[in-house]
Amino acid sequence: MLKHSSAATTRTAGRIRVAVDRARHLLAPAEVIASQETQLRYRIERWLGEGGFGQVYLASRIGRSMVVPEIVCIKVSTRIDGWLREAYFGQLLDGHPRAIRVFDNFPLMRADGQVLYCLTLEYAQHGDLSAYLSRSGKGWPESTARREIAGILEVLGKLHRGQTLHRDLTPLNVFVCDGRRLKLGDFGIVRQQSDRRGITARTMNALTAPSDILARAVPRWQARDDVYQVGQLLGMLIKGDAHARIRPHEIRRLSCTDHLKEIVYRCIGERRKRYESAHEMIEALATRPTALAVGALRSLKGVHVAFTGILSKRRSEAIRAARRAGAIVHGMPSMRTTVVVRGRPNPLQAAGRDAGLKLMEIKRLREKGHRITLLNETQFWRLAIPRQSSGEASPKLEIRRPSLR
């Protein structure tokens, strides 16, 4: 419960603070504002922060209401465009357990003729995710991070199903409520796309924006770019630090399973290989990881083959042997690849034992319905240098030191 001074002291202090703070703050502590929509009044308690759309204040409701809590946030701006969008999407998502609620929206006319556009919002007791992680300094357990990010994705999925993109999924716009429950807020730059090509590539915060968007290499923002931002949020939760973006080479050091590392990498890696929507990422989080099992093959003749991992012989020798056996060799798995030869795991793989760049691409291609046979090195050499007819000895394989190439 917030403590309040006497009415006389409040009025006096309010007039002084309004005069002092008006240059920087749009509202002042102890100031009372009223909504013409709901007839409710709100007392401003203190300034909380400022974002791309406007300023945010802690406030207390004056009078009774069955809907609006006693303690709320008042978000105020001099711009009508962001206010209209936030009010609209607040109504669209009203009642969703993972969206910050919008209880009221109203214009406020000042004596000097200035119009302030106000929103009455749900108050997140623990503040935004960035501030929360700064205070705690600890990463979240993987199970908690998975559950809470899935909750944020549920809200985002509703937007994506309506052909709407958020574009501002940052730690400053994700809020920590009771029980460390995450909720999404701030819909000031949300836009609806007319087709799947996307919308203008604009973001309010460079921290979680895709690098190709920042470099203006990509002109249009798509659902996969929202997914990139959620991947950044997931990595930050595991790391316990929201002050710097997660780089791909840092993923293998995250304190989580290889399966989750792979999901983070898929989100923030190459743009065309990201999850294409919030729904796809939800499915990935809910899917149990499965090991890549080896298959069987009768011949290498005519197959399209790629190599991954550390081989017992030089990679160049394996490539020559594959070509002599009639195979077409690819440097990286693609839609044309039908066989992948897997050596020993490289300890420096991007996201764990089963999550090097090529292995992740194999899984992605399989998800798209493409059939790829996985062979171990022993199977490959048996096919590449088959046993001769009886009476002829097989060529002896010279075992060399492992190569990282």
Image (cartoon, rainbow, N blue to C red):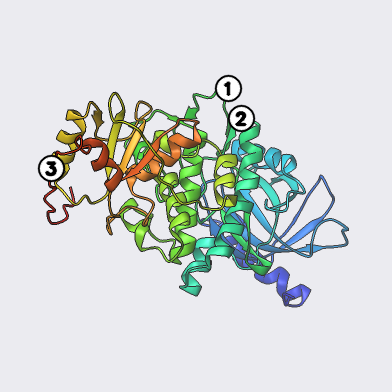
> Seen from this angle, which residue lies furthest front?
391
Residue of label 1? 194
**Residue 134 position (above or below residue 281):** below
Q: Residues within 10 Å of mark 1 (few under 14, many from 20)?
A: few
For the residues marked 2 and 1, what is the alpha-carbon distance in whole angstroms? 7 Å
Numbered mark located on residue 351 in the image: none
**Disc 2 residue type?**
Gln
Image x and y of residue 64, in percent = 88, 62
Residues at discs 1 and 3 in contact (Cβ within 8 Å) = no
Q: Nearer the viewer, residue 226 or 124?
A: 226
Number of numbered discs: 3
Q: Residues within 10 Å of mark 3 (few under 14, many from 20)?
A: few
Secondary element at tag 2: loop
Q: Nearer the viewer, mark 1 or mark 3?
A: 3
Numbered mark located on residue 395 in the image: 3
Picture residue at 82% right of the left edge, 55% below the top: 40
**Disc 3 residue type?**
Pro
Residues at discs 2 and 1 in contact (Cβ within 8 Å) = yes
**Disc 1 residue type?**
Ser
Look at the image and tell me whether residue 196 can be seen: yes
- Quadrant in the picture for residue 331: top left
- Quadrant in the picture for residue 348: bottom left
Q: Quadrant of the N terminus?
A: bottom right
Residue of label 2? 163
Residues at discs 2 and 3 in contact (Cβ within 8 Å) = no
Look at the image and tell me whether residue 110 can be seen: no
